Image (cartoon, grey):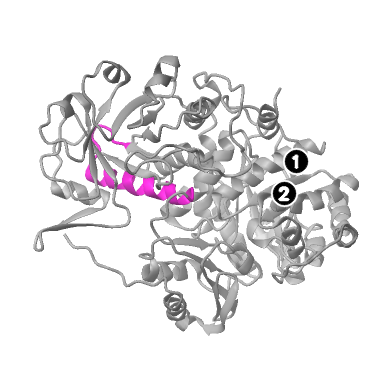
Amino acid sequence: MNSSVASVKKYCNSLVKYSRRKSIPVKVGDVTIGGDNPIVVQSMTTIDTMDTMGSVEQTIRMVDAGCELVRITAPSLKEAENLRHIKAELRKRGYDVPLVADIHFTPNAAELAAQIVEKVRVNPGNYADKKRFENIEYTDETYEAELDRIRARFTPLVELCKTHGTAMRIGTNHGSLSDRIMSRYGDTALGMVESALEFLRICEDLDFDQIVISMKSSNAQVMVEAYRLLVQKLDEEGLKPYPLHLGVTEAGEAEDGRIKSAVGIGTLLEDGLGDTVRVSLTEEPEFEAPVAQKLVDQYTSREGHDVIAEIDENPIDPFAYHRRQSREVINIGNTNVPRVMADFSQLEEVSVKSLKTIGHFYLPEPDKWTMNDQGADYVYSGNRAISFMLPNGIREVIDYPAWEQLEDKKNRHPLYTLEQLQTAETCDDSLNFLKLEDHQLDTETMSVLEADNLVVILNTQNRHAMPALRRFFFELEKRKLQVPVIIERQYEIEDEETFLIQASTDVGGLLVDGFGDGVMLSACKGDGLDVLKLKNETAFGILQAGRTRMTKTEYISCPSCGRTLFDLQETTAMIRKRTDHLKGVKIGIMGCIVNGPGEMADADFGYVGSGKGKITLYKGQDVVKRGVPSEQAVDELIEIIRQDGKWMEPQTIEG
């Protein structure tokens, strides 16, 4: 067995067959995470922990919405003590949902909480360390001395958990790695894993294994790499296969939050990883569990999927992102951003107004076209050409028999079936499309794919869609074929949220592994213009969540908790209203100073609560202004963006 195959076996059971990783069971009250138990859905309260009745009422709403585990922040001893009253009131009302205390910086609060609730979450980045964003030089001896210090600080909590039967989550966050870890490992997936393993080794030394581990990040690529690497490292060191808590931290709100969560969480669930899930949305917490449940429900009937050919060699590094090398065909492939192809083939008639749904707008008075940041690059019109001249910047794809009859073929390109391509007498000099299913990759097809003016549109009918499509990409890599590939998926939309989750999982999982030169979310018969608009926007949203094409402002916003110092949902909406035209700019919106600066580490600018009615504004990780009154803070944020040269005035598109 070669090394690449060995790495596959270590981070998942199979890359082609759905098979959930077997972890040890961890008991949290009456709920068991891992083992042969179903994946557990959980969430976190957002209300002040000192508001006992408010916390109870919110918890009840969450449980009634499907939440099986509820986390509550305990930033100090007084909040930890009040968990006792919250728990008592819940039990009095007949709710026995297990409670989890969320701890940052305060070991004494963790030690108290461990005697009250069923589980304690600690962040190894700040449990025994203070983050000052300093680079520190360590020798092996001084580093070992730091580990001894952590052991002394952490051991009392472990012993209390053992005594009281309390479970623990060791939860690494990408944005809050300690200065010590950053100094030795850098801002890497390996640093995230080592941060957790340092604490985990102490637990194993103390004979404590009721532990769940998480590797959360607001960047889905980093998150996926870290979880995979964690599983491999556990196996390498001979550590137990601990259950995994999956989550994309600071995913955001509305469609963007759902798409980003599904890209990160769904990719890992596809590989059989994950024992409990939390979707972090900047919304009321009772809206999170149903989204998480829809993600999990995708896998309840997955084991009977169509057989996918086994993989005898994994040609990619699953622990580090590398985009697949493909040749450039006009503006597809190589270093070009992934393209979006809209499907108009099911429309009875394509009009000028139809193009509004895919971001292209005709302005009658000046007689010109304009487009927004989510203007599709290609439109597939099926078996007949569009009757009017398309705007510059968009090309038309037409079924080969209809294309062959056209007199004007400028910016119009043929789409072939494999049989048509093998017998065709004509083709386009610059760009041709070939429609393939995932199983159509044999020796005969291989020779066709070597043409330097060909792009594949790839689809599958397999319910285990992402691995089926990934298997095709693996074969291209193995055979060193550099044909660009556009990923096609077709969904009948009965429930918009379910569609977002399915599409983001199927397509996003491929993007995270570096696969895909474009996306087409195909139309179904009966799809109206509103559905075509949704599919176009979703395609762009998935590309953004996968960090492969940035077309709009990205908001890294926490889901709020009892530490939040302002109305996070209202503030996020206000900032979004003023800044959502800033293409590619990342803005962190954090409720408090505890996690804010670290967890928005990926942001260009930051808006962080630092006191009642006070905001601290950041450029990157550098403080620009402290103590800004909240009523002035959005204007001040915009001024900082303006001074950095990234501000532009919003434009209104009419028509």
Q: Quadrant of residue 487?
A: top left
Number of callouts: 2
Binning the other alpha carbons within 10 Å of mark 1 as few (below 14), some (14 to 19) or many (20 upward) gives some
CB atoms at circles 2 and 1 under 8 Å apart? yes
| Residue 647 rendering spot, x and y as whole percentages | 39, 72
The reply to whether the magenta stretch includes residue 625 is no
In the displayed structure image, the side of residue 566 where residue 153 appears, left or right:
right
| Residue 88 rendering spot, x and y as whole percentages | 71, 59
Up/down of 623 relative to 538, above or below = below
Q: Residue at x 75, y 50 (%)?
A: 194
Q: Say what amino acid the circle numbered 1 marks.
A: Lys
| Residue 454 rendering spot, x and y as whole percentages | 34, 30
**Secondary structure at numbered mark 2:** helix
In the displayed structure image, the side of residue 298 where residue 82 appears, left or right:
right
The residue wearing badge 2 is: 193
Q: Residue at x 27, y 42 (%)?
A: 378
Q: Earlier in the sequence, mark 2 or mark 1?
A: 2
Up/down of 86 relative to 635, above or below = above
The residue wearing badge 1 is: 233
**Secondary structure at numbered mark 1:** helix
Q: Say what amino acid the circle numbered 2 marks.
A: Val
In the displayed structure image, the side of residue 12 where residue 569 appears, left or right:
left
* Residue placed most toward the observer, 17 or 331: 331
* Residue placed most toward the observer, 338 or 212: 338
Q: Quadrant of the N terminus?
A: top right
Q: Which residues are magenta?
A: 522-547
Q: Quadrant of the C terminus?
A: bottom left
The reply to whether the magenta stretch includes residue 528 is yes
Up/down of 9 relative to 374, above or below = above
| Residue 297 rendering spot, x and y as whole percentages | 52, 36
**Predominant secondary structure in magenta?**
helix
Q: Residue at x 64, y 31 (%)?
A: 20
